[in-house]
Image (tube, grey):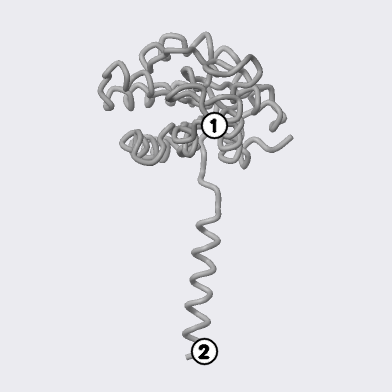
Amino acid sequence: MRKINYGIGLLALILALAGCAKPEIRNAENKGENIVCFGDSITFGYGANTGEDYPANLRHMVKLPVINAGVDGDTTFLALERLDDDVLAKDPRLVIVEFCGNDFLKKIPREDTVKNLSRIIDRIQEKGAMVALVDISSGMFFKEYRRDFKKLAREKKAIFVPSVLSRIITNPAMKSDFFHPNEKGYKLVAGRVYKAIAPYIGAK
């Protein structure tokens, strides 16, 4: 009986350790110079002052330079149009991709959003950079996108950043309007992004 219990315990330990291993990420060994935050108003920092957006907060947490390539109102279609100039030309080591809110508001089918994001990820990875895909869901809010984004990140071997707006969307003290974070909210977003990317880019 002791041998059986020991065997079960050993198996449980092996499984636990395997669960703690960080997932394999494509281009993890690349030598790009910058982190590029590529997104819409959440990345741009709508609702906060200059220097209070999440990329600005992230700059204090990492060694690499951080570029804010967020554009208020951007859809995934518009993102594809500016991908070369705003991202690929910036010698990225890691690109943090955050889109879907405006696609939803403009009634762009979710399937098209996922397809566009897949193309964006492919082109970034072909350039040699890592990708982190940001999920802006919170609870039931955007839960369908959360499922699709998590699957896409797994298929593409990209970092998945889950539910960055959790406990922000429902907390007036963290928001500047019905949807966008304020200074406090963006600090929380930056911390969640950092937690996901830290194993791959290192801390300051």
Q: Is residue 17 above or below residue 51?
A: below
Provide the residue designation for mark 2.
Answer: 2
161 or 116: nearer the eye? 161
Provide the residue designation for mark 1.
Answer: 173
The kind of residue on which mark 1 rests is Ala
Neighbourhood count class around disc 2 (C-alpha, 10 Å): few under 14, some 14–19, many 20 upward: few
* Residue 60 in picture, x, y percent from top left: 71, 29
Q: Earlier in the sequence, mark 1 or mark 2?
A: 2
Which residue is painted at 49% across and 12% down in the image? 71
Question: Viewer-nearest of labels 1 and 2?
Answer: 1
Residue extending farthest to the front is 172
Which residue is painted at 42% across and 21% down in the image? 120
- The span from disc 1 to disc 2 (Cα, nearest Å) is 55 Å
* Residue 148 in picture, x, y percent from top left: 33, 36
Which residue is painted at 54% across and 31% down in the image? 174
> Which disc is residue 143 wearing?
none
Q: In this rendering, does residue 158 appear at all?
A: no
